[in-house]
Image (tube, helix red, strand yellow):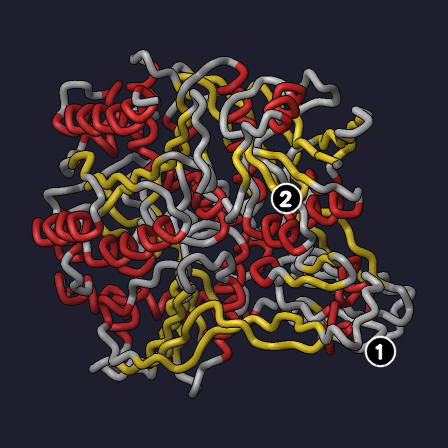
Amino acid sequence: MKIAIASGKGGTGKTTVATSLADALASSFSINFFDCDVEAPNAHLFLNPDLKDIKPAVIPIPVINDEACSACGLCVNVCQYHALAVIQGKVLVFPQLCHGCGSCTLNCPERAISERERDIGRLYFGKTSTGISHYMGMLTVSEPMPTPIIHQLKASMQEHADITIYDSPPGASCAVVATTYDADYVLLVTEPTPFGLHDLKQMLGIVKQLNAPAGVIINRQGIGDKRVENFLAQSPYPILMTIPHRIEIAAGLASGRLLTKILPAYRHQFIALYEKIAEQVNVNQENR
Amino acid sequence: MITHKNSLNQLVILSGKGGTGKTSLAASLMYLSSKSQFQGVFVDADVDAANLALVSQAVPIESHIFMGSQCAEINTEKCNQCDRCFEICRFNAINRPDIGRDFYAVNDLLCEGCAACFHVCPQAAIQMNKQQDGEWFHSTSPYGHLYHAELFPGAENTGKLVTTVKQHAKLYAEDHDIPLVIIDGPPGIGCPVISASAGVDLALLVAEPSVSGIHDLERISAMLKHFNIAILVCINKADLYPEGTQAILQLAKDHGYPIAGKISFDDVVPQAIVKAQPVSQFAPNSRAAKEIELIWKQIKKVIFKKDGEL
Amino acid sequence: MILIISSQGRTLDSKPNPRFGRAPIFIRYNLESDAWVALNNPAVTEQGGAGVAASQFIIDQGVSDAISGNFGPNAYQALKTAGVLMWSFNQDYGTVQAVIDAYVHSELKQINHPG
């Protein structure tokens, strides 16, 4: 079972929910936890895995064999990202624009292009004291593209587990798609404010395209109003849990404590949440 | 970084971590700027989760289609199912025939528009279609003009849409002799953040005193340092976790980043958002509003004093 | 010597545009003959790599000197490799003609690193 936790809006509590869910389920299930927020990963601060740097995250970029190259310019025309240019009879490569698609390499009539792997980040792995397998990716500062790292992070999985949790980055762009596209269920975390509602709708736009079952957790209930609840009441997405706005929770999270440690009653709530998710996924599969 | 010694100054508000209070602060700065001698033009650069228009009573006066990427499409009549496209696609964007579908198809969400399949298809059965990836708007508000956008869900956020709204804001400011552009930035450190920061005079980092907030603050400040952008730090929800606030003050001291001020954890902040107003307008006598005014004072000092030295 | 100046509009009275890759127009000016022409920048609508595309375009025009507000790292690398000198109009010159005059009077700053 693969569960992605996403939101649209930043700071609603994705990592809070993802890490608490993992912690609550760890005693009954084997868990693979993927921190896919590779620009600013935080889950390790809460789950405390013994992380080791495994390998670089890479993107394959073209290398031009100048002797074989005839400067025909076909590679420049084929590249959709202007990552190549012909200047004074030589082909110049612009690595940060390259998406690693391999098209130039495939299409060169002189076979003058080979590939090398360029480092754009790092992949980490570790286990927590509760037996969770924790996978973290980190984009190198100044690199623009997180998406290849998310794909490689998932591919670095060592062993299957009963439950896989994907902690998604904020927003609703392609990095979120890369995180959620293969999930069996998308758990959305929002806050009861105009910002929460607007960005939840953005995220639901992706969920609809994924055709995956989804449900919502309203976090910091009490800081806003009923607009999110009212909106969801008219939608096919159930509200699975509500977490109240309480200073002790906020302060505890600020210090790096898991929600399930700040208020142990949440362990049961997250186990119950998982059971609801599992049921929704089964129903969804039967209906297919 | 070559900085322009002209009359326009650009400020970007960033944080690394999402949810630290950038947009809320941006809205209050819009209000304060409109009440001061330093009028501004405003940009919401968080294009896939754009919220600034929601608290600034923005009314669109122009809207524009944003054409971004391309997406491949397979013509099933010409396709002979040779599988070449599946073999070469590096983004898992080609779906082989499956239960319920006996033809090859492109997964729109995963397709990155690289056209490798287009070039490799021996039947020329693939075409590349330009996609509308979003929309951008020029709006008016009680505080000044706002440029903002909505990226369609799942689209690639390459920074082009961010650059588009920023450039139009800058042109408007220059044409109307407005001295300030304030850019509400996105979370993270990747491409849209890089685009939001390009060419700015100052980055205001809104720090959250939590372990996550501090971790991400290190990342965003490293990114800004890489691109040689001046930094000012303010601490939001400052009384939430005093050890965290201390850690941020120490970090700022170690790196030489001036502190613009602190904002306390105040219920009027979410209340103002619910009422779709900047805090400074909604509750001008509140603690948070007074603290924000001090931050604005520091911003004016850093930005406009610089101009005065010319 | 052939100059290009990144511009907002199609005449010498137009306002210069400081961003090389995404300026809508390049004014191509021949210093010896004073002949000039306004060219559309093909990179202006590109999703990414505008700096590269714009550089490729002006290199193919046989330009010797490129004048803009700043040049991103990719444009800088491309133009440097091609031997095109880069100059910045580091204040508000108001018109393309004023920028050309400033160039002629050695008032412009030469760019030696990407901006």
Q: Which residue is mark 2?
A: C85
Q: Position of residue C14 (x, y in %)?
A: 67, 19
What amino acid does circle 1 point to? Cys
Residue A117 in the figure: left or right of residue B97: left
Q: Are dots 1 and 2 in contact, CB under 8 Å? A: no
Residue located at (65% from left, 25% from top):
C100
Residues indicated by labels 1 and 2 sit on the same polypeptide chain: no
Residue located at (8% from left, 53% from top):
B243
C6 or B32, nearer to the observer? C6
A239 or B266, nearer to the observer? B266
Residue located at (49% from left, 51% from top):
B191
**Chain bearing mark 2:** C
Crowding near the residue tagged with mark 2, few <14, some 14–19, many ≥20 C-alpha atoms within 10 Å: some
Residue B305 in the figure: left or right of residue B132: left
Crowding near the residue tagged with mark 1, few <14, some 14–19, many ≥20 C-alpha atoms within 10 Å: few
Q: Position of residue B223 (x, y in %)?
A: 37, 53
Element at badge 2?
strand
B116 or B273, nearer to the observer? B116
Residue A101 in the figure: left or right of residue B115: left
What amino acid does circle 2 point to? Leu
Q: Which residue is mark 1?
A: B82
Element at badge 1?
loop
